[in-house]
Each structure stands twice: as C-alpha cells, then as structure tokens.
C-alpha cells in the first residue's frame, strides 16, 4: 500500500504519440475515446495511430539504430536513463492519476504499478552500466591450433514492445527500459484501453530527456492491426510482448517470416496447492486478497485453489468470509483495494465464465454477479466457486476477474496432477507448514515461478516467465537483461 494524496480525481493523459522525436497526432486527426471504467464516462481521447504511423516509427527506430551512436555509447545511455528516472519521479503523481483513471486501479495499491517501475528504471541503468559486455573465455583447442575466444554482447537491434492494459505503465517500463539500456532502439505499442500510460511516457521522454529522435517511439492506436504491423515488419529484430496466449501465437506467426527473436509473457491459470498442514488462517485470506486486489486482472494470480479433502469445508468457510469482507468500489477511495474491471467487454467475459462454471456443476459460494450497490462502473463481486471440475472451462480458461475456483484433492500426487492439468505454466503457490515438503511440491509444478507460504517469487532481481503456453524467455534478473543482447563469439589469435 502506498500513502498517496487522493481526491485529486480523474485526469486525462496526453493525446499524442511520439514518432522520430516528434509528439504528434495522426495525419487524419482521428481520435478514440478513453473510458474511465469506474464511472463508464469518456475521460478523454487519444490520437488513433495507423499502420502508416507505425511504419514511420519503425523506420525512425531502424535509422537511429543503424546510423547513430546509441547502440555503442553506454555512458550516454546511462545519462539518458538516469534523466528518465528523475523525470518519471517528477511526473509520479500525474502518472498515478492517469493510471487510476484509465485502468480503475485502486489508488491504495498503485505503488506496485507506478512507484516500483520508476525505481526499476534506476535499477536497469545501474545493471546495464555494470554489465560485462566483453567476456574473455580464454584459450580453446581447435584443429587449426589454439584460439582465444571472446564473447561480445551486442544489442539485438530494433525492438517492438507490445503491452496490455492490466498493468500498463509497469509493463511499458519493464518491456522497454532494459531494451534501451542494452543499446536497442524501441517502438512501443500500448494497449488500446490504456493509451495514456504510453503517451505520457512518450511525452516525458521527448520533453524531459536527451534520448535522441527515433531511439524511443510510442504509437497509440485503437486497432490491433497496428500491433500486427509492428510484429510483422521486417525492419524489427525482436518483439517483446505481454498479453493473451492467443495474441502471442499471432505474434510468433507474424515474426516467423523474418525469424524474429520473440520474448512472450502470456496467460496463466495458476494453481495454489494448500497442503493439509497449512496455516489456513494465514494462507487463505491472502489468497482471497490476491484474487481481488487487481480485480483479478493479473496473469500470475493463483486463481485455482486446491484444498485437501479432509479440511475442505474449513477452507471454503475462510475463503468465503475473506471474499465477502474484501473492500471494493471507487478506486479513488483509499479504503478500497479492488476497483472495477477494465471494460464492459471484460466484465461480460468474467460473468460468462462464472455462469459456465455453475452450468458445469460448480457451487456458487459467494458473489457471482454485479454488486447492487455499485450500479455504475464495471464492477464484479468477489466470487467463490467450489466443487469445480478441473477439466471444466472455468478451471481451464484464464478468467481475469475477482474469482477463485476451489477443487478438493486426496493426495499430494493428485494435487500436483490437477495443478499441472493446464495449457499454462506461469506461476503457482504452495502453502504448508513443513517447508521442505512444500518445496518438493513446488519443484513438481510445471511453471516458471512458485511462491511458498506467500513469499513472493516476483521482483526485479529474479527471472520471471512462463513454461508451456505461458510464454518464451524471461524478464527481470540478469537473464531478463540478456534477452535484449546477443552474444557474439569472436575467435582470435592468442
Ligand atoms: P486482451 O485480449 O486482453 O485485450 P491482447 O493480448 O489481445 O489482450 O492485447 C495485448 C496487446 O496486444 C494490445 O496492445 C493489443 O493491441 C495487441 N494486439 C492485439 N492483437 C494483436 C496482433 N494480432 N498482433 C500484434 N499485437 C496485437
């Protein structure tokens, strides 16, 4: 939780995009509306960039990479990213107000979406400055006599970054700052529901840093085809993407023609295995909070709770109480920790999945609909579904709502099998007093990350990513930086 001044109210962000150093509108002047999901009103507009705007942005990024010193001047990049960090700090309150307005993220929990990513800019600047770009691997025997080999780490080139709406400012930073620090040039395509978290970033870069024209571009648009154009453009060397698995597949396919390097962080359907020796009174209220705090709009949310059959009723009761008492409503009220869903379409999707769960035999324990006391805004009640069939849609598809499903299991082996019964493999959670046993269970979950007893796996210094259809590659940690570099091995005389 952050301690912020609230009551500042709705704030419209910058309408413009950033292409080749210029803050501009699209040539036709077309704009699209940005809806505040907490009141369903138009909060403002954004310029509606086109495929032509995207082509210009990619051209500018290509030129900046090929013709400027950006990729070779580490000191200058450090200077620019330090400036960016300071500029973002100066704009912190404005960025927070834009975030609450376009996402409906409760101001009380906006720290992880605004303050943390701003700190991460500093982290990447320092990490990149200290990184060893030339590694001497010593002498190697070859048929032609001994050779010294050095590995030179070089930027990949032009990076296209495509981001979603659930944590827009954080992901705009996470996908672009390590790329820039590593010497790449970047075109960012923010999600259409949250254009301002991207356009404000572009404005700050243009007005408050020395980052040269073309090095960083932002193209906002209401059209998916503009993201499609970025992912297919032969002048782009790498795509970094966070979003749905369906869109991730389309991006992989679009990049196949030019064999683009692709970093994908996709959907999840993470399980929380609650072992029979777990402290239910600590694990389950936390599980309920995790489900509600971003209105369930988090890819790493452990949304499938697996309870041991002999303590099943006890677990359901604790989850029910926790969800019924969760504070939600107006995101500007600092007492609330859950806001609305991002859009009417997302709310309908969530309600449809809840209904499909009930149809397939699940028991609705609490919630399940639109709260009567919040008729305006895209709110969904915190919802608990018990007796959920692990093969049913509601247990297999990502819901992205404040919904927990609960399934009983009889043995640790069965719990692991249910957890792994998913096309996804992003995160997981294990709760249990015997930490060694919990750790052993964690190692059997086919996911990229696991938390035990609420101890978070997620942070800037630790690699994060998915297995199976949850993604390719890693963000964060040393691995996350190296994704934006290619190691060139050079053989040379001793
Ligand atoms: P959601 O379905 O939850 O809106 P998506 O994964 O479709 O999430 O969207 C995430 C981002 O991907 C957005 O910026 C969106 O504009 C972009 N996008 C959607 N479709 C495509 C596509 N075919 N190619 C490239 N980007 C796309």
Image (spheres, grey):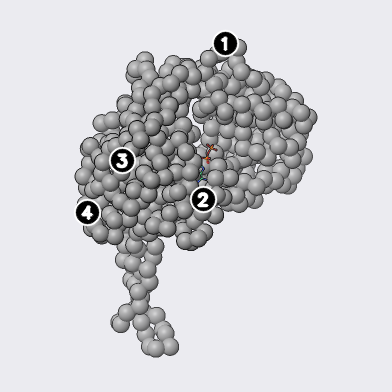
Does any atom of ligand 1 lie closer than 8 Å to the CB of label 2? yes
For the residue with label 3, is its CB less than 8 Å from the closest atom of ligand 1?
A: no
Q: Which mark is residue 251?
A: 2
Q: Quadrant of residue 356?
A: top right
Q: Which residue is mark 3?
A: 18
Q: Which mark is residue 75?
A: 4
Q: Are marks 1 and 2 in contact (CB under 8 Å)?
A: no
Of callouts 1 and 4, which one flags the residue occurring earlier in the amino acid sequence? 4
SS for callout 4: helix
Residues at marks 3 and 2, CA–CA distance in whole angstroms: 23 Å
Foreground of the two, 488 or 478: 488
What secondary structure is found at the residue carrying circle 3?
strand
Q: Is residue 64 left or right of residue 168?
A: left
Q: Residues within 10 Å of mark 3 (few under 14, many from 20)?
A: many
Question: Which of marks 3 and 1 precedes in the sequence?
Answer: 3
Residue neighbourhood size for the residue with mark 2, other residues' Cα within 10 Å, grouped as few (<14), some (14–19), many (≥20): many
Q: Are marks 3 and 2 in contact (CB under 8 Å)?
A: no
Q: Is residue 204 above or below residue 255?
A: above
């Amino acid at each position: 939780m952050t301690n912020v001044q609230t009551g500042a109210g709705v704030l419209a962000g910058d309408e413009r995009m950033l292409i080749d150093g210029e803050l501009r509108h699209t040539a036709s002047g077309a704009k699209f509306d940005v809806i505040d999901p907490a009141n369903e009103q138009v909060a403002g507009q954004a310029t509606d960039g086109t495929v032509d705007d995207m082509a210009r942005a990619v051209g500018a990024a290509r030129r900046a990479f090929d013709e400027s010193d950006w990729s070779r001047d580490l000191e200058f990049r450090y200077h620019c990213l330090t400036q960016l960090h300071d500029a973002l700090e100066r704009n912190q309150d404005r960025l927070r107000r834009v975030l609450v307005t376009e996402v409906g993220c409760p101001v009380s929990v906006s720290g992880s979406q605004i303050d943390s990513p701003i700190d991460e800019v500093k982290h990447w600047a320092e990490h990149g400055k200290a990184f060893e770009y030339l590694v001497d691997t010593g002498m190697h025997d070859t048929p032609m006599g001994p050779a010294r080999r050095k590995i030179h780490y070089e930027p990949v080139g032009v990076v296209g970054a495509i981001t979603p709406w659930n944590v827009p400012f954080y992901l705009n930073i996470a996908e672009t700052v390590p790329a820039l620090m590593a010497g790449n040039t970047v075109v960012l395509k923010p999600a259409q529901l949250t254009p301002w978290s991207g356009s404000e970033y572009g404005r700050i870069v243009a007005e408050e840093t020395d980052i040269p024209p073309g090095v960083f571009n932002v193209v906002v648009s209401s059209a998916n085809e503009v993201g499609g154009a970025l992912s297919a453009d032969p002048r782009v060397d790498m795509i970094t993407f966070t979003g749905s698995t369906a869109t991730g597949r389309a991006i992989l396919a679009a990049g196949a023609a030019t064999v683009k390097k692709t970093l994908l962080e996709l959907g999840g359907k993470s399980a929380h295995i609650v072992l029979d020796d777990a402290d239910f009174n600590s694990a389950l209220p936390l599980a309920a909070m995790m489900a509600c705090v971003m209105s369930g709009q988090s890819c790493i949310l452990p949304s499938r709770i697996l309870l041991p059959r002999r303590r099943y009723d006890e677990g359901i009761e604790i989850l029910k109480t926790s969800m019924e008492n969760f504070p939600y409503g107006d995101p500007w009220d600092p007492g609330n920790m859950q806001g609305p869903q991002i859009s009417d379409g997302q709310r309908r999707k969530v309600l449809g999945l809840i209904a499909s769960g009930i149809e397939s035999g699940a028991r609705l324990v609490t919630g399940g609909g639109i709260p009567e006391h919040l008729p305006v805004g895209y709110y969904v009640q915190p919802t608990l579904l018990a007796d959920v069939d692990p093969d049913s849609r509601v247990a297999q598809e990502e819901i992205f709502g404040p919904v927990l499903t609960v399934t009983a299991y009889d043995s640790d082996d069965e719990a692991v099998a249910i957890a792994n019964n998913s096309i996804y493999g992003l995160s997981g959670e294990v709760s249990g007093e015997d930490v060694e046993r919990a750790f052993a269970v964690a190692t059997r979950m086919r996911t990229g990350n696991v938390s035990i007893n609420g101890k978070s796996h997620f942070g800037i210094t630790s690699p994060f990513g998915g297995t199976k259809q949850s993604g390719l590659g890693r963000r964060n940690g040393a691995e996350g930086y190296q994704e934006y570099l290619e190691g060139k091995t050079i053989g040379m005389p001793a």
